[in-house]
Image (cartoon, rainbow, N blue to C red):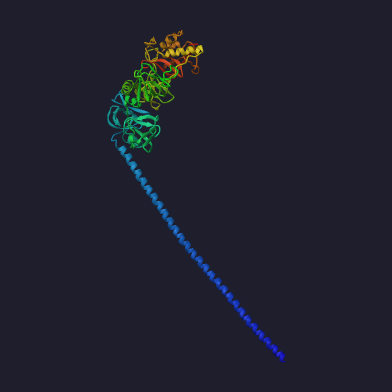
Amino acid sequence: MSEKKDYTKSLSRARRRRNHNDYFRYLIIGLIVAAAIAVVVIIGIAIKKGFSGGGKGQEALQSVEETTEETTVDEEASRQAEEERVHQEQKAEEESRKQAALDAYSNLGIVQVSGYLNVRKTPDPNGDIIGKMQENSVCEIVSQEGDWYQIHSGPVDGYIAGQYVITGEEARALAAEQVKLRAVVTADNVNIRQTPEIADNNVVAQALLDERYEVVDQLDGWVQITSGYISADFVEVKYALNEARKMDLKQQAINQYQNLLISKVSNYLNIRSTPKDEGNSNIIGKLPGKAAGEILETEDGWYKIRSGNITGYVSADSQYTATGQEAVDLATQSASLMAIVNTDKLNVRTSPSTDAGIWTQISKEERYPVLAQMDGWVQIELDGGDEDEGNDSAYISTRDNNVEVRYALTEAIKFSPLEELANQQASRRNQIVNFALKYVGNPYVWGGTSLTKGADCSGFVQSVLRNYGISLPRTSREQAKVGRAINSSQMRPGDLIFYANSSGTINHVAMYIGNGQIVHAASRRSGIRISTWNYRSPARIRNVID
């Protein structure tokens, strides 16, 4: 009984201890769970606050970026506005200068021609030409005399035909479109160079005082124009209109040469490849009497010259060549008005009209003497012929700028004597040609047959060939029936080339001398001379030797 009570008490105490231990265990677990929940809550709050704070940071950053972007946009807009303001100021200044150039004329006239318009000394279609006005050149109209305007334009005061001039508000409107940046020459005889540098052999032309050239570009110390470069020291660059150019007549021709040489011989002076007389072997060209060249060097009694497209040596003996003031004086006497063709072939008409028929063509290899000038046309000399004392009137148009009419000096021609060959037939031809060339420079006389005192074209070839036992009729028309017809590819020295007048009748003859050249009694002005074989269109070629 006592053991049972003790057991019951012992069991009761054990339950009470287990219940007590369970209580503490659950309490600790509860505290741990509570602590864990608290940590989770705290972390959640922290995370929430963290995200909330980050949003504000992004908003702040975005705000800064937007402010910066707005500032950049404002600066760019300000810069563009400033550039536009400067551009508008420059444009306004440019327009102001253009307007000032236009306002310089109180009674403006503007030339409307194809090519150029002659300015004459008097209101007369045959009056002396003292200047030229290119298309869209302007002038100040001083007065009107019938169909002529008295004008002032650049360095020229004279008269122009009124039919080619527009005046009034229409003229001002047209002129406003022609105000351009131009280089106005402030000195006389200014070099136009091929490159923007002072170098040998790069001078392409000369510009005269008051001439105006449209500016292509401005470089350091140079102004580029369409034909080359001019030193900025000798031009004024400004907005301006084009004006007349003065015809400086013979002086303009002389100004083309900086170190002038003039041939003093009566016929031709030999140009040699070396500064030594080696007979025929080193002759490369001939300088006609009173022809001009540029002295490049002086070497032991020889001048190295450039004349036309020939560079070589001529004797420095004063009996053959003139330099210095003597050369200038001779050049002034011999410079003549010439038509210088700048296209391969140019049509020749019998009257100054495009309605007139084309009866021959001329070559750019020759310079043609000018007999008369008209607005848009020039009359040139071709040759004298042998059927009468004159030849057809030959007119070429200047309207397409295919020909330059100016005073010029004769220059060298390419020429090499024919060598004596072992082949008997070729040798005979060369002997005939070399014999004919002895008389170059002698006079042309219509109806004449003398190689020394004067001959016309047919008389010249007749007398040359008679010396070699070849008989020809007297006139070129009859000579053209002798021998055998050949074409230009078959030509050999000594063959005869015939030319026709506007009606197709043979009236001129020349002898082929090789190298694309002929010798012929050309005209009273030219005498017996050397020319290119196609200086005008050939009508017939005959072999009269074989």
> Which quarter of the figure is the N terminus placed in?
bottom right
Residue 445, placed above or below residue 369: above
Q: Residue at horizontal 55%, vertical 73%?
A: 38
When asked about the image quadrant of residue 106, the answer is: top left
Which one is in front, 50 or 272?
A: 272
Residue 543, placed above or below residue 256: above
Q: Whole-percent x and y of residue 204?
A: 39, 29
Q: Whole-percent x and y of residue 93?
A: 33, 43
Which one is in front, 466 or 163?
A: 466
When asked about the image quadrant of residue 147, the answer is: top left
Residue 176, placed above or below residue 162: below
- Is residue 33 visible in this depiction of the protein? yes
Is residue 30 found left or right of 350 in the rendered image?
right
Q: Whole-percent x and y of residue 316?
A: 36, 21
- Is residue 358 visible in this depiction of the protein? no
Q: Whole-percent x and y of residue 217?
A: 39, 37
Question: Disc count in the image?
Answer: 0
Which one is in front, 71 or 163?
A: 71
Q: Residue furthest bottom?
A: 1
Is residue 186 found left or right of 311 in the rendered image?
left
Q: Residue furthest front?
A: 300
